[in-house]
Image (cartoon, rainbow, N blue to C red):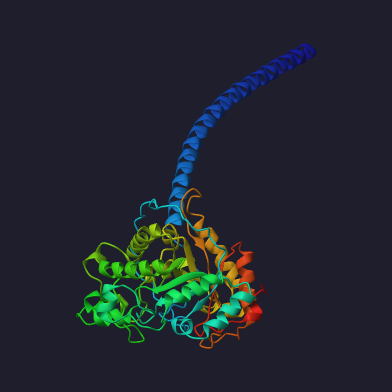
Amino acid sequence: MRNKRDMYINYERSYKKRRRKGNRWGMVVIMAILLIGLGIAAFYIIKTNMDKENNMDQTSREKTLEEATDVSLNQSPKVTDNLQISDQKPVPQVTKIPTPTIAIVNEPTKTPEVPKDTQVPSIVKGIYVTAPVAGSDSMNELINLVNTTEINAMVIDVKDDQGKISYEMDSAMAEKIGAVTNTISDMGSLVTTLKEHNIYLIARIVTFKDPFLAEQRQDLAIKNQDGSLFRDNNGEGWVNPYNHEVWNYLVEIATQAAAIGFDEVQFDYIRFSTGKGMSKVDFGKEAKKKSKEDIIIEFTKYIYEKLKPLGVYVSADVYGTIISSSIDAGLVGQNYVEMSKYLDYICPMIYPSHFGEGNYGIDYPDLEPYNIIRKALTASQTKLDQIPEEDHRAIVRPWLQDFTATWIKHHMKYGGAELKEQINGVYSAEYEEWLVWNAGCNYSEDGLLKQ
C-alpha cells in the first residue's frame, strides 16, 4: 500500500509539477508575444515622432542658415574699433571712433552701358605730384625717375585740397569764384612733354573737401543746425555731397582735364568729413531719405556715366579701412563693393600707418609693411568676389606709403626697403598695380626696380 500510495503520491506530484511548468511556459510565450507587439508599436510611434522632430530641426537649421547668409552678404565684418581716420593725408592716429547709426543701403542698378574704351589699359605704377612741383623745374627730376625706374605714371593735382585749380581752364563756376590759379602755367605743353616720355597721366580732383568753394558759396557747403558753416578739425569747410550743383562743378573740371589730354580722372576725398561735430550737421532734406553710402554711390555712378563717354578712365581713392570695417564705411560713406561697380579703378589708401594697432592680427601695422599690405589686399579680393564675374568691377590699384609716420607711437623710418616690402605685398596678394604717396614728392628710388 505504501508503495502504491507512494507511487500515487509521486505520480500526482509529478503531474501537478508538469502541469504547472506547462502553464508557466505558456504564460511566458504569451507575455513575450505581448511585449514584442508593444515594442513594435512603441518603435513606430517613437520613429514617427523623431521623424517629425528631425524635419522640424532641419527646417529650423535651414532657416537659420539662410538668415545667417543674408547677414553675411549685407554686412561688412568689423576688424577693430581702433581705426585711424582723418581728413588729412597722411593722417595722424586718432582716438576710438564711436559706432554710428548706419542706414541700409539700397542696391543701385547695374553699371550703365557706355562706349567701349579706345585705350589699352596700362599696368600702372605711379607717383603723386603736387601742382607746385609739376609747374616747376623739379618736374625734370621726376621725369628722370620715370625714365630710369619702373614708374610709368603720375597723379597730378588738378583741383587740390584747398579747392584751387592748378591751371587755366574753361569753367564758369571756377572763374566766378576765383578758384583758377596759374600754378602750372602751361598744362597743355606739360601734358605733351609727359606723353613724349610715355607717362600715363592721372588728373587728381579733390572732391568734397573744398574749403575755397565752401567759403565762396556757402549755400553749397555743409552747415551746422544753426545755419553756420561747418568746419572740420583744421577749421576748413566742406561742400555738401547731397548738393547736385557741386556734382556738376566737379564733372565740369573733370571734363576739362580729359579734354587737355589726361588718360584718367581720379576723385579723392570722395567722402564725408570725419571732423568733430559731423553728427550734428544739417545735410538737407535729401539726407533724410538717403544714407551717406547711398549718396556717394549715386555720385560715383553719376560721374562714371558723364565721363566714360569722353574716353577717359574713372577712378576714386577710398580709405583702406573700409574694406573690412562697416563702421568706417558708414562713417565716411564709402561702400567698397558698390563703388567698385561704377569705377574703372578703385584705389584704397592702405598706408601701413593708417591702420590701428591690432588690425588684421598685426600688433603694430606700421612696423610690418609687407604683412599689412598683403592682408588688406587679400581682404579686398574676398570682398570684391561678392560681385558676380560677369558684372563690371573696378581694378584695384592701392596707394602705398613712402613717408615716415612720426605722429604714431609705434612707427619706423620708411625708405626704399619699406617701399619694396609694400610692393611685394601687393604682388603676393595677386594684384599688379600701385601708386606711391609722398606729400613732398621725394621718392625712395632705391625701392624701385630699374628700367
Quarter of the picture holding the N terminus: top right
| Snapshot quadrant of residue 253 | bottom left
Q: Which of 81 and 352 is in front in this view?
A: 352
From what the image shows, is residue 328 above or below residue 89? above
Q: Could you say where residue 382 lies in the image, as x and y percent from the top left? A: 54, 59
Q: Could you say where residue 113 lies in the image, as x and y percent from the top left? A: 39, 50
Quarter of the picture holding the C terminus: bottom right
Q: Is residue 287 left or right of residue 383?
A: left
**Residue shown at 36% from the left, 73% from the top:** 207
Q: Could you say where residue 240 lies in the image, as x and y percent from the top left? A: 28, 73
Q: Could you say where residue 355 lies in the image, as x and y percent from the top left? A: 52, 76
User: In this orientation, does residue 330 appear?
Assistant: yes
Q: In this view, does 171 lie to the left or right of 323?
A: left
Q: Nearer the viewer, residue 230 or 259?
A: 259
Q: Which of 13 and 6 is in front in this view?
A: 13
| Snapshot quadrant of residue 230 | bottom left
User: In this orientation, does residue 104 appear?
Assistant: no
**Residue shown at 70% from the left, 17% from the top:** 18
